[in-house]
Image (cartoon, rainbow, N blue to C red):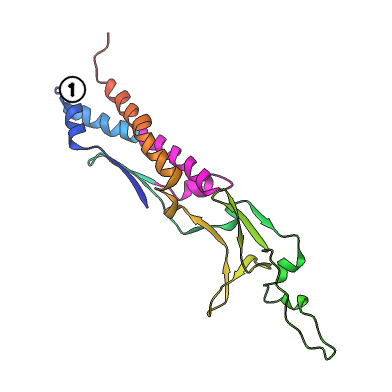
């Protein structure tokens, strides 16, 4: 996903009419103002994304939201990259229940299996509590069939394939451009981008 600001021909023409004697300088300052405002807007969008997704720090968001200024096309684009963030980028809670921690562990689940007089293992009694939960999107999300193994939190895949999977939260690529990040982007066009361009163009006006 990406968010782009592009100055339209009408806006460019209107600004350049005000600076007929210096069209080249006006175009340069338009690009500079778009760059100044774009970087500030990117910061605002990043903050909104962190709140929206619920990450513990800004680092994973910043790493996956690069931006690009196109001076010739007078556009500024914010990109959202990557797949789901590792689960430890979010507040994680491990269950204190041993039963929950080992229920789905391929190597430890036998501890919950009773044996009969012949030493044969019986069925496992399920537990309603998930071994691993994480705070994502502002809510505590429980990972079903999760357990804590030697390599950290994992979960058993559902369906016929089975197997284990790592635990991930939402991805920046999918979250950029929706909900709070989209609101921050739209609001920032008027409150950040336009004033930044105006300040740059004001440098071309005579003083005194």
Using residue 193 as the reference point, say whether residue 45 is left or right of it: right
Q: Residue at x 42, y 38 (%)?
A: 184
Q: Quadrant of residue 87?
A: bottom right
Q: Nearer the viewer, residue 188 or 68?
A: 188
Using residue 117 as the reference point, say whether residue 184 is left or right of it: left
Q: Residues within 10 Å of mark 1 (few under 14, many from 20)?
A: few
Rendering coords of residue 83 (x, y %): 46, 59
Q: Residue at x 17, y 24 (%)?
A: 22
The residue furthest top is 208
Q: Is residue 36 above or below residue 118?
A: above
Residue that carries the numbered disc 1 in the rendered image: 18
Q: Which residues are magenta?
A: 37-66
Q: Is residue 69 visible?
A: no
Q: Is residue 8 above or below residue 171?
A: above
Rendering coords of residue 153 (x, y %): 64, 64
Q: Is residue 129 visible?
A: yes
Q: Is residue 14 above or below residue 96?
A: above
Question: If the image is split into quadrants, where does the C terminus sit?
Answer: top left
Rendering coords of residue 175 (x, y %): 44, 51
Dot 1 lies on which element? loop
């Amino acid at each position: 996903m990406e968010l782009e600001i592009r100055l339209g021909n009408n806006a460019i023409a209107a600004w350049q009419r005000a600076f007929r004697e210096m069209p080249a300088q006006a175009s340069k300052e338009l690009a500079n103002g778009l760059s100044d405002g774009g970087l500030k807007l990117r910061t605002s969008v990043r903050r909104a994304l962190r709140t929206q997704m619920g990450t513990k720090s800004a680092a994973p968001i910043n790493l996956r939201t690069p931006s690009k200024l196109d001076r010739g096309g007078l556009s500024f684009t914010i990109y959202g990259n990557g797949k789901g963030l590792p689960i430890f980028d979010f507040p994680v809670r491990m269950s204190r229940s041993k039963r929950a921690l080992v229920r789905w562990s391929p190597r430890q689940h036998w501890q919950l299996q009773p044996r009969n007089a012949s030493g044969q293992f019986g069925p496992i009694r399920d537990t309603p509590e998930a071994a691993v939960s994480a705070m994502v999107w502002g809510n505590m999300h429980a990972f079903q069939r999760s357990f804590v193994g030697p390599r950290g939190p994992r979960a058993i895949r559902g369906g016929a394939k089975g197997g284990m999977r790592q635990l991930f939260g939402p991805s920046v690529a999918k979250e950029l451009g929706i909900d709070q990040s989209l609101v921050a982007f739209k609001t920032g066009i008027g409150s950040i981008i336009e004033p930044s361009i105006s300040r740059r163009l004001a440098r071309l006006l005579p003083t005194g």
